[in-house]
Amino acid sequence: MIKFIQKQLDLPLISTALIFALIYCLMFNTSVVLHKYEYYQVSFVSAIFELLKQFIYTYITVFIFFFGFAIHRLIFIIGSIFLFFTGAVASYYLFYLGVAPTEKMMPAIYGTGVSEISELISTRVIIWVIFSLSICSFGIKHFNPQTPKSFFSRMLTAFCLFLAVNNIISPSFKILKSYFPIQYLHNSYVYFFGNKDHVRQDISQKFSFQITNNKEDIAGVLVIGESARYKNFGINGYERDTTPYLNKINNLYSFQGRSCDNTTHLSIACLFSRYSEQNIDKVKSETGFLSVLTALGYDTTWISTQSIGGYYESTPTLYDEVKFSIIPGGSLLYSMNSHDGLMLPYLEKLLEKKARQFITVQLSGSHWNYASRYPEEFAKFKPTQKKNAKVDQASCTKEELINSYDNSILYTDFFLANLIHLLKDKNAFLIFASDHAESLGENGRLGHGADFAPEQKEIPFMVWFSDSFKQNYPELVNAVSSHRGQIISHDYIFHSVLHCLGIESEILDLNYSLCSYKKIKTDNL
Ligand SMILES: [Zn+2]
């Protein structure tokens, strides 16, 4: 019997799959192990034991993939090239930027257009991919795997291929979800074929809302920053004066803020929603406060220099909640020479209207690539990164990175001051909150979206009132002022906007309104 099995087993094919799996794991999963070590580092011995165990599980799974591919020579070649290519890309971004292809990163990964992707590719990642593919093709040439001849081997490879596919759909062990290739394959599967039932309930129909404010000219503006850090604003005590304009503006209150999440698509859905960070899984189940304002007859506009199209599959989208949405010149997020200031003439025109108005402005702010976010005259802190070079955050020196980042904050300061200038003669208020913050090297982390990065949620949060608003509603302004020194999270935006505009509803929680004197809840901060 044993002799029969030995005869039927294709041993060279098994050893080829074992070697390919080992190379794959060493080249690509080492970055996962290093990344995860941060969570386990409390005890060195248990960390090594735990990570080794996980590595072995992963190794066996990766072997199942390669051995499954061996069902046919052509499948082995295509499958191996695919795994080495994707493994190289995923490991690069995890190792250098600390960004893993988790489920919540999928909309950001697949929502990015082809032209935008080209701007994210650096020379280093190209070299790593070419090197990885060379190793793979050398392996294929050297081992020259052939389609198995014996019936037993064919059955065995078919069974492994079935297990591999099954692991993509539903991984056998939870830990596999954090290792490559299961992590990115499973999350891609969920993104493309998972539950697409994202029809949002319209809260403007579900609950009742009444306008109690009799002023017909009231205007509210919400500016959503992009990747702005609380700490890097001069107005918040940063050692560099990155906010020379905001420093001089009256009726401006700056709070230490906290974002709902550290990715754009979740944070934005959350900040418009009545649900709090603790119920983040529900934020895409209903429309947000923009649908309420539109239903109440407000002239609502969304203006942005970045597109959120790919991020919001839910129906209706955030754009559907407003009367009018505009992205002048298309998404600038990956453009070198256009900046947020492009929106100012449009805003000036919009603000000429004499109506109850609410404008949402979404900035490109301080999104990577930082040096592309501001015109040359704002390059006050030098040296900066080269904005036209194919670089990523990890390719710059720390000095260049922070200088470029701080220059982008200087430009946001300029933008906000200009917008406030446009509002100063109106009965208006403005809220500025970033969607999330950014890592600038904390424990080796860069960018945003990483699993474990508290600094990516420390955002600037400001409220400004015009003199006329202050005169009309002194009690609201005093209430906002009474909250100074407190941490204000995204959870306050829904309730504050509606309350400050004088809208009443059974779903408003004044404990989360900055325009209310009530003591702010601190239980979830
Ligand atoms: Zn963002």
Image (tube, rainbow, N blue to C red):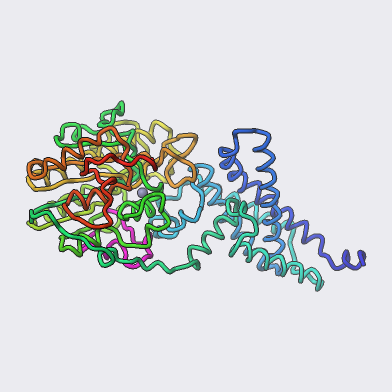
How many marks do you count on the picture? 0
- Tell me the quadrant of the picture where the C terminus can be found: top left
Residue 312 painted magenta: yes
Asked if residue 371 can be seen in this view, the reply is: no
Q: Determine whether, in the image, residue 449 is placed left or right of residue 173.
A: left
The residue closer to the viewer here, 74 or 472, is: 472
The residue lying at 61 percent from left, 43 percent from top is: 33
Against 258, residue 129 (above or below) is below
The main secondary structure of the magenta stretch is: loop
Q: Which residues are magenta?
A: 305-329
Q: Determine whether, in the image, residue 480 is placed left or right of residue 114.
A: left
- Tell me the quadrant of the picture where the N terminus can be found: bottom right
Asked which quadrant contains residue 9, the reply is bottom right
Q: Determine whether, in the image, residue 61 is placed left or right of residue 417.
A: right
Q: For the view shown, which residue lies furthest in the top direction? A: 239
Q: Position of residue 188 (x, y in %)?
A: 51, 61
Q: Position of residue 294 (x, y in %)?
A: 20, 62
The residue closer to the viewer here, 301 or 341, is: 301
Asked which quadrant contains residue 5, the reply is bottom right
The residue closer to the viewer here, 72 or 440, is: 440
Q: Position of residue 441 (x, y in %)?
A: 45, 35
Asked which quadrant contains residue 227, the reply is top left
Q: Position of residue 262 (x, y in %)?
A: 41, 46
Residue 331 painted magenta: no
Q: For the view shown, which residue lies furthest in the bottom direction? A: 151
Asked if residue 515 can be seen in this view, the reply is: yes
Against 194, residue 234 (above or below) is above
The residue lying at 63 percent from left, 62 percent from top is: 167
The residue lying at 66 percent from left, 52 percent from top is: 58
The residue closer to the viewer here, 174 or 487, is: 487
